[in-house]
Image (cartoon, rainbow, N blue to C red):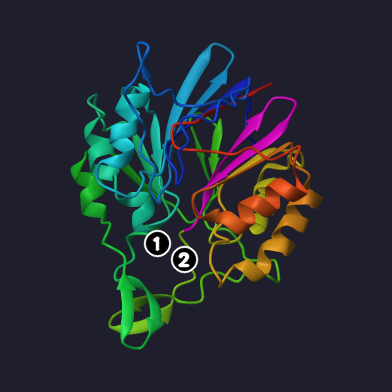
Amino acid sequence: MKLHEADKVEVLTLQDNFIDLVALDGTDIIQRASPLEGLEIRKSVLAEHGFSSFITITSGKKTRTLLFDFGFSEHGAAYNARLLGADLNTVDALVLSHGHSDHTGGFEQIADMISRDRGNIEFIAHPGVFTYPRYLKYAENLKVYFPRFSRELVQSKGFKLIESKEPYPLLDGNVLFLGEIPRRTDFEKGFPIARYEDDGVEKQDSIADDTSVVMNLKGKGLIIISGCAHAGIINTVHHAISLTGVEKVHAVMGGFHLSGTIFEPIIERTINELKALDPRYVVPTHCTGRKAVMGIEKEMPGQFLFNMSGTKLVFAS
């Protein structure tokens, strides 16, 4: 699938799991949120167990904007968007990576910040995001449910709902929604305790709605951003390469879902596979987990970028 080259891709994180206001590690690529109002230390962005990003793609004189995921709490991503000065009225499309509440929870308040006509703004997601009920099953008598996210809610906000299991080009071919990601590696086996009900029958939830978005930075390669990578971040990157025909990877960013005892056994293999792919930058966020983040930093020090709530990453050709 043809993916147009971008001159610049900026990723402003409206929500992530971490914040450090005194990191003082800004570069040409990394821009941290400032706590200053004038010369007084007065403000901080909010960090939560969730993910949301405001992505700006510039090609020539044209700039397009994409909102990818909406964070956990009702107010967190919206609060940060206001604090960071993100103009949501410039948003040309919205994408949901999957239907879990750490990515859907802030949708309503984010949507309400878009005051222009929403009828021409596409909201793109896999139809599986509306699966309900879905839950994590720790034992027969312990099931932890995800709140419902519905078609009716999206439609009530006036967006043009696009449901697709297939890859879907966005913003005049400047972004690719990957759609359903094939599970091909022998170690990325999904979330074994995830379940859903179909007509009252409990079934294993492969979280097939999980997906990512991809851009192509001129002369440098793909920028791939995942929500949680429940399909596996290595599967995700290989699928992006296969679909676009672009073998060079500039940045892999997002939640890699390697946190906790269920996923820690595949951290080493995942890092080895990332090293083999040799992206210029690796930016683990959200659900990647402390051990995996530290492992990536140790094994790929020249490629590792540490993300936070409020951080803007600037990738230029």
Is 116 in front, or is 257? 257
Q: Could one spot residue 88 in this view of the protein?
A: no
Is 7 in front, or is 307? 307
Q: Residue at x 34, y 32 (%)?
A: 80
Q: Is residue 7 left or right of residue 16?
A: right
Is 301 in front, or is 113? 301
Q: Could one spot residue 66 in this view of the protein?
A: yes
Residue 207's label in the rendered image is 2
- Upstream in the sequence, badge 2 or badge 1? 1
Query: Foreground mark, 2 or 1?
Result: 2
Q: Is residue 149 left or right of residue 182?
A: left
Q: Residue at x 46, y 43 (%)?
A: 18
**Disc 2 and disc 1 in contact, CB within 8 angstroms:** yes
Q: Residue at x 45, y 59 (%)?
A: 209
Residue 266 coordinates in the image, percent (x, y): 67, 67
User: What's the distance in space between the residues labelled 2 and 1, CA to CA?
Assistant: 8 Å
Q: Quarter holding the C terminus?
A: top right
Q: Which residue is mark 1?
A: 128
Dot 2 falls on a residue whose secondary structure is loop
Residue 274 coordinates in the image, percent (x, y): 73, 51
What is the residue that sits farthest to the left in this orientation?
156
Which residues are drawn in magenta? Answer: 210-228
Indicate whether residue 305 is drawn in magenta. no
